[in-house]
């Protein structure tokens, strides 16, 4: 196992998290003023009741599945000596003196996650606040400021805009996904709460706005638009498009009880220009980060002399890892641009999914494959199975909208094992592509024979070998007489010689199939009772390069 340390650059304290996500997503259940000190959170860790995580200093622990006060109190006491910053459990949290005592003795704050919010959503938001995904200084946003606020800090920007217009704010992208939101969301209506909890405008509201032409009007105007009333929404909305030249980057939405004054309308217009600068800065930093992460991941997967340093910069030293390879299914008639876009969306979704499971996971596209590295929190023989479960859960979540498949490598215990793991998932991914959706998640053990056949086919193609012996004679006969004898032989071999199944495969009567078998044995000079002859014919048929 590779040893080393990881330097982290946390950016937010627990107080900042409570200020930005509080009231809407999180509440401080127990913990005093010390919970809001300026100590930076060192990382996000999902509690594993079986494994033994080594927490970074002042970590925020997500207590998924914890509900009993006794279990929560025990975990708080365990986290105290590890200097954890806080423990998040699902709200409502029962009133219990044991919890107050445990918080006081451990010094670990207890927070509640609002109903309706998922752990994956919380992990993603916390990650964006803490910038845990940054890979070194080069990949992150610099310390420069825009409009007096740290460049790219959209949550601070949303709070500043909320103060200017005196209304809760969301900043959204072109697809109505919430990029950041201000405090005071509890003052808004149920529609806004659903939007923030889901980090996406709910489908029914989005459809209603689209049908009423709201997005068309929004993107055609330079000034804010006011929506006085919407069905099932108790407050009005003021929205303005965020532009960079002719490009629409997103929009700002304020939940209001009446139209904004002229002064606040102008403040919102000015804010939209500042948001555009921040969004462009975020995009620039993201592009740099993507390129750097892809380079580091590629270096690590090569397993050469630069692999240990690459793993160190990715934060993956000291643990065995499993490699995933995600391939987007190529649908007939799909344009190249659409396939690239789908691959990017899948890669982003996979990154969010894996980091919600393990914050140190790393993903990056290399060529037309999105690779992922999953560190294993405990050593065991079931590492591949756990990775298969993660991959299956991810594909179940994205559904059929983005058809894809994922190859899973053996566990890489050492840096030198990574190159072999990458070679394995590449071979498995090729089979998954060849299967065209019939298999979604696979390890080498699931498709070993198919990988060998594909490699044999490559050798045959490279040498220019042509079929010989019985198969060559049958191909020549079919070409002249349209005799379907090769098709008959293939069905016979694939069905292990079971005539009814083979006949059904080629849609003929079993007696007709028996007649064809006799003909092919005669014409091809093939002894079907000889296992070596059958194997040789099967191998040629499976590796034959069709032109």
Image (cartoon, rainbow, N blue to C red):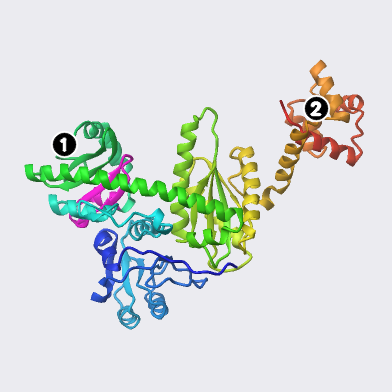
Query: Which range is magenta?
Result: 169-196
Tell me if residue 80 comes above or below residue 245 in the rendering. Answer: below
Tell me if residue 91 comes above or below residue 340 in the rendering. Answer: below
Observer-nearest of 93 and 88: 88
User: Does residue 96 show up magenta in the picture?
Assistant: no
Instruction: Tell me the quarter of the image containing the C terminus.
Output: top right
Of circles 2 and 1, which is in front? 1
Among the two numbered marks 2 and 1 on one chain, the one whose residue lies closer to the N terminus: 1
Residue depicted at 26% across the width and 72% down the height: 37
Quarter of image, res 11: bottom left
Residue depicted at 25% across the width and 38% down the height: 243
The residue tagged 1 is 223
Tell me if residue 417 comes above or below residue 277 in the rendering. Answer: below
Residue depicted at 42% across the width and 79% down the height: 78
Residue 541 position in % (x across, y down): 78, 33
Q: How far apart are marks 2 and 1 (CA)?
A: 70 Å
Instruction: Tell me the quarter of the image containing the N terminus.
Output: bottom right
Residue 53 position in % (x across, y down): 48, 71
Q: Crowding at label 2, few (<14), some or many (≥20) Cα neighbours within 10 Å? A: many
Observer-nearest of 340 and 291: 291
Residue 358 position in % (x across, y down): 47, 61
The residue tagged 2 is 486
Q: What element carries label 2?
A: helix
Q: Can residue 435 be seen in this view?
A: yes
């Amino acid at each position: 196992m590779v040893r080393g340390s990881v330097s982290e650059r946390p950016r937010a304290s627990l107080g900042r998290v409570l200020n930005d996500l509080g009231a809407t997503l999180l509440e401080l259940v127990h913990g005093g003023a010390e919970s809001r000190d300026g100590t930076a959170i060192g990382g996000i860790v999902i509690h594993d009741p079986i494994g033994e995580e080594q927490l970074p200093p002042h970590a925020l622990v997500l207590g998924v599945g914890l509900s009993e006060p006794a279990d929560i109190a025990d975990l708080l006491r365990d986290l105290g000596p590890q200097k954890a910053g806080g423990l998040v459990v699902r709200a409502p949290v029962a009133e219990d003196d044991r919890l107050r005592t445990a918080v006081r003795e451990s010094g670990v704050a207890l927070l509640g996650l609002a109903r309706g919010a998922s752990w994956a959503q919380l992990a993603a938001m916390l990650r964006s606040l803490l910038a845990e995904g940054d890979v070194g200084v080069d990949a992150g946003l610099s310390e420069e400021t825009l409009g007096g606020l740290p460049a790219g800090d959209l949550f601070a920007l949303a709070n500043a805009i909320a103060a200017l217009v005196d209304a809760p704010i969301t900043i959204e992208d072109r697809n109505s996904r919430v990029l950041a939101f201000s405090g005071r969301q509890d003052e808004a209506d149920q529609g806004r709460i659903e939007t923030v909890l889901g980090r996406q405008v709910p489908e029914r509201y989005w459809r209603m706005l689209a049908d009423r032409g709201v997005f068309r009007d929004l993107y055609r105007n330079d000034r804010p638009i006011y929506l006085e009333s919407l069905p099932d929404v108790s407050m009005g909305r003021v929205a303005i498009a965020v532009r960079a030249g002719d490009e629409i980057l997103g929009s700002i939405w304020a939940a209001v009880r009446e139209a904004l004054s002229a002064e606040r309308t102008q403040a919102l217009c000015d804010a939209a220009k500042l948001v555009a600068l921040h969004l462009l800065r975020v995009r620039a930093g993201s592009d740099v980060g993507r390129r750097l992460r892809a380079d580091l991941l590629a270096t690590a997967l090569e397993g050469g002399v630069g692999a240990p340093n690459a793993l160190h910069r990715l934060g993956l030293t000291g643990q065995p890892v499993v490699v995933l390879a995600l391939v987007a299914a190529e649908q007939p008639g799909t344009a190249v641009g659409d396939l690239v876009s789908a691959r990017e969306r899948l890669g982003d979704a996979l990154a969010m999914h894996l980091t919600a499971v393990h914050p140190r996971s790393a993903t990056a596209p290399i060529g037309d494959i999105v690779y992922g590295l999953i560190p294993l929190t405990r050593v065991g023989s079931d590492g591949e199975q756990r990775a298969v479960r993660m991959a299956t859960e991810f594909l179940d979540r994205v559904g059929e909208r983005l058809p894809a498949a994922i190859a899973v490598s053996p566990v890489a215990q050492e840096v030198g094992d990574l190159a072999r793991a990458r070679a394995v998932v590449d071979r498995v991914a090729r089979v998954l592509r060849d299967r065209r959706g019939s298999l979604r998640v696979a390890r080498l053990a699931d498709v070993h024979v198919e990988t060998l056949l594909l490699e044999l086919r490559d050798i045959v193609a490279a040498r220019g070998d042509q079929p010989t012996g019985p198969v060559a004679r049958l191909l020549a006969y079919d070409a002249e007489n349209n005799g379907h004898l090769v098709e008959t032989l293939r069905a016979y071999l694939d069905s292990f010689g079971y005539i009814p199944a083979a006949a059904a495969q080629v849609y003929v009567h079993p007696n007709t199939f028996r007649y064809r078998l006799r003909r092919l044995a005669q014409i091809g000079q093939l002894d079907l009772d000889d296992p070596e002859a059958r194997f040789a014919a099967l191998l040629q048929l499976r590796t034959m390069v069709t032109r």
